Image: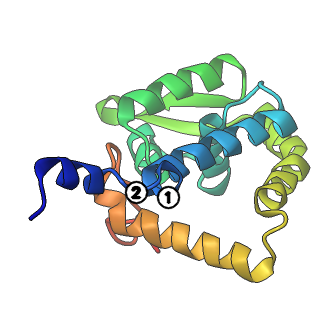
Amino acid sequence: MATSTDTTASAISLDLYDQPGHLIRRAHQISVSMFHELLGREVTPVQYSVLRMLHELPGLDQVTLAQRVGLDTSTTADIAVRLEAKGWIVREVLPRRQRRLLLTPEGEKLLVQFTPAVNALSHGLLDGMGEEDAQQLLRLLRKFVHLNNDQSRAPLRSSTDDTASG
């Protein structure tokens, strides 16, 4: 018969380094560290995501932008203020107090300058894994994000279907 001590021990017997949450947190730490190593600290990974989305879909309003990059609207508004202060975007007021966001020429120039480092980052994060493992990791990460999207504080939303594509 199992005692409560046995039950407790078995419940926490999974090695910390085998727990998905711990591994995802560590992977995020590593990714952010490598981002700053290659791109500096002028822009954060989240700010870069916002700039990239505005490059891909110019003129998005803040709410749609937040949905497209998986941020809450207040965080997106704070980021927009910072990016505008740096001269990388402009915010235009639309009816009903929405704001349309556009990259400035300086913002476009920054993205062009960052492209080689971002490509190096993408390769560096997967370096040593081999092509098949790297593609499998990306496929599984996309699947994980898709399956758990609604658990996020700020679920990713696209224009084609109200969920992240996976």
* Residue 102 left/right relative to 150: right
Q: Residue farthest to the top?
A: 85
* Residue 91 left/right relative to 155: right
Rendered location of residue 27, percent (x, y): 61, 49
CA distance separating discs 1 and 2 = 7 Å
Rendered location of residue 128, percent (x, y): 84, 66
Residue at x-position 85% and y-position 43%: 114
The residue tagged 1 is 18
Image disc number at residue 123: none
Residue at x-position 83% and y-position 56%: 124
Using the image as rendered, state which of residue 125 and residue 158 is in the foreground.
Answer: 125
Residue 57: quarter of image: bottom right
Colouring: rainbow
Using the image as rendered, state which of residue 57 and residue 74 is in the foreground.
Answer: 74
Q: Residue farthest to the front?
A: 1
Residue 29: quarter of image: top right
Say whether marks 1 and 2 touch (CB < 8 Å): yes
* Residue 84 left/right relative to 107: left
Residue at x-position 81% and y-position 76%: 130
* Residue 105 left/right relative to 18: right
Q: Residue farthest to the left?
A: 1
Q: Amino acid at mark 2?
A: Leu
Rendered location of residue 4, percent (x, y): 12, 49
Q: Quadrant of the N terminus?
A: bottom left
Badge 1: few (under 14), some or many (20 or more) residues near its Cα, within 10 Å? few
Rendered location of residue 86, percent (x, y): 71, 20
Using the image as rendered, state which of residue 166 and residue 32 is in the foreground.
Answer: 32
Please say if 161 is above or below 148. below
Q: Amino acid at mark 1?
A: Asp
The residue tagged 2 is 14
Residue at x-position 78% and y-position 41%: 34
Q: SS at mark 2?
A: loop
